[in-house]
Amino acid sequence: MWFAHLFVTLHANCENILYIYIFFMINSQDIKKGTAIRMDGGIWVCIDFQHRKPGKGNTIMNIKVKNVSDGRVLERRYNIGEKLEDVVIERRPYQYLYEDQSGRIFMNQETFEQIPIDNELVIGHEFMKESDIVEVVSDTTDGTILYAEMPVKTVLRVTHSEPGVKGDTATNTLKPATLETGVEVRVPLFINEGDLIQVDTRDGSYLARAKE
């Protein structure tokens, strides 16, 4: 459940400009995966959570959060009912078009607006190729883009790899391979140049050979 707390301050000059700041609060037990909160001067997204009742004590909330700016991961513990500052976020699909001096250019799939997004804000950018669809997450308060994220799985072509061993289907022995985006991953020995493979964009791990 959200609670809106209103803070009003008066600008200290002769114009007496009045500024109104609205902060939305969320109860700790309402935090789920994908919830964004503001703490320690930054914005953090919940990537895991757990309710736990230690013996006869009060139920506590363990959450694991990731900083959207630098990728740091922290674990925090809160009592049920504690309030945190909620960041209302918006998720929209964008298509990657091309890269220029302003950064990577993406197009909103609903409005067709084109915007640049810095590489460091795109999670999994090493595996991104033109026409890929990413999810762009922004702060609804001011429209600031927090990050963009590739799908967990993607299919890419192997552009360079040492020849595989004919008939060797073992998957526990790996070799280096360069993909069409330039990133290097490790693949089973039977994978060859020109093959399409499915990889996990979170860590670059090989998942399967893909069909044409």
Image (tube, rainbow, N blue to C red):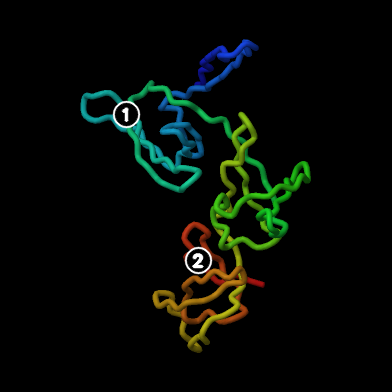
- The C terminus, quarter of image: bottom right
Residue 31 in picture, x, y percent from top left: 45, 31
Q: Amino acid at mark 2?
A: Leu
The amino acid at mark 1 is Ile
Which residue sits at x=74%, y=46%? 109
Task: Say few, some or many: other residues with alpha carbon within 10 Å of mark 1 (under 14 / 14 to 19 / 20 or more).
Answer: some
Q: Residue at x 53, y 30 (%)?
A: 87
Residue that badge 1 annotates: 60
In the rendered view, tell whether residue 168 sits above or below residue 97. Answer: below
Provide residue 157's location: percent of width, then percent of height: 61, 72
Residue at far right of view: 112
* Residue 49 % position (x, y): 40, 38
The secondary structure type at the circle numbered 2 is: strand
Residue 113 is left or right of residue 116, and the answer is: right
What residue is drawn where x is 49% and y is 36%?
A: 43
User: Where residue 195 sits: x, y (%)?
Assistant: 60, 77
Residue at the (35%, 31%) spot, across then down: 61
Q: From this view, report whether residue 30 is shown above or below residue 11.
A: below
Q: Is residue 165 or residue 162 the one in the foreground?
A: 162
Q: Quadrant of residue 197?
A: bottom right
Outermost residue toward the left in this view: 55
Q: In this figure, which residue is indicated by the disc labeled 2? A: 207
Query: Which image quadrant is residue 129 in?
Result: bottom right
60 versus 121 height, above or below: above
